[in-house]
Image (cartoon, grey):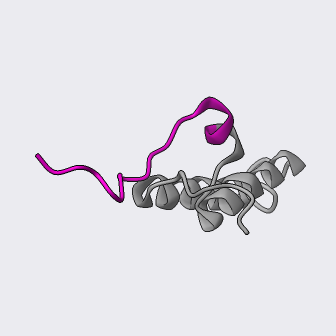
Amino acid sequence: MKLFAANVGSTDRVLRIAVGLGALCLTQWGPATPWGYLGLVPIITGLAGACPLYSLLGFSTCPLKNAPTH
């Protein structure tokens, strides 16, 4: 049983992971601030393919799997 349905598309996932890794790098280089650990959030949601905020807002970047054909 999945807690959240997949609602993060492939492009969104790649961007989330890239931004998360960039933010995580801030913990070691640059200003070396612990705020960079917030980069874990987009990394986790990108790897999981599900975003709790998207679920709350009813938003999805996933393509429709069973779209009707006309």
Hey, which quadrant is residue 11 in on the image?
A: bottom left
Give the residue displayed 58% in from the left and 61% down from the top: 49
Q: Is residue 17 left or right of residue 14?
A: right
The overriding secondary structure of the stretch rendered in magenta is loop
Using the image as rendered, state which of residue 50 and residue 31 is in the foreground.
Answer: 50
Give the residue displayed 66% in from the left and 57% down from the top: 45
Furthest residue toward right: 34
Residue 8 percent across, percent down from the top left:
52, 53
Using the image as rendered, state which of residue 59 and residue 30 is in the foreground.
Answer: 59
Furthest residue toward left: 70
Residue 37 percent across, percent down from the top left:
82, 54
Q: How many marks?
A: 0
Using the image as rendered, state which of residue 31 and residue 17 is in the foreground.
Answer: 17
Q: Is residue 38 left or right of residue 43?
A: right
Placement of 1 over or under 45, stated as above or below? below
Residue 14 percent across, percent down from the top left:
48, 61
Placement of 45 over or under 38, stated as above or below? below
Q: Is residue 2 left or right of residue 61?
A: right
Hey, which quadrant is residue 48 in on the image?
A: bottom right
Residue 44 percent across, percent down from the top left:
71, 62
Give the residue displayed 58% in from the left and 53% down from the top: 19
Give the residue displayed 33% in from the left and 57% down from the top: 66
Q: Work out which quarter of the rendered image holds the N terminus and state it.
A: bottom right
Q: Is residue 62 left or right of residue 68?
A: right
What is the magenta range? Answer: 54-70
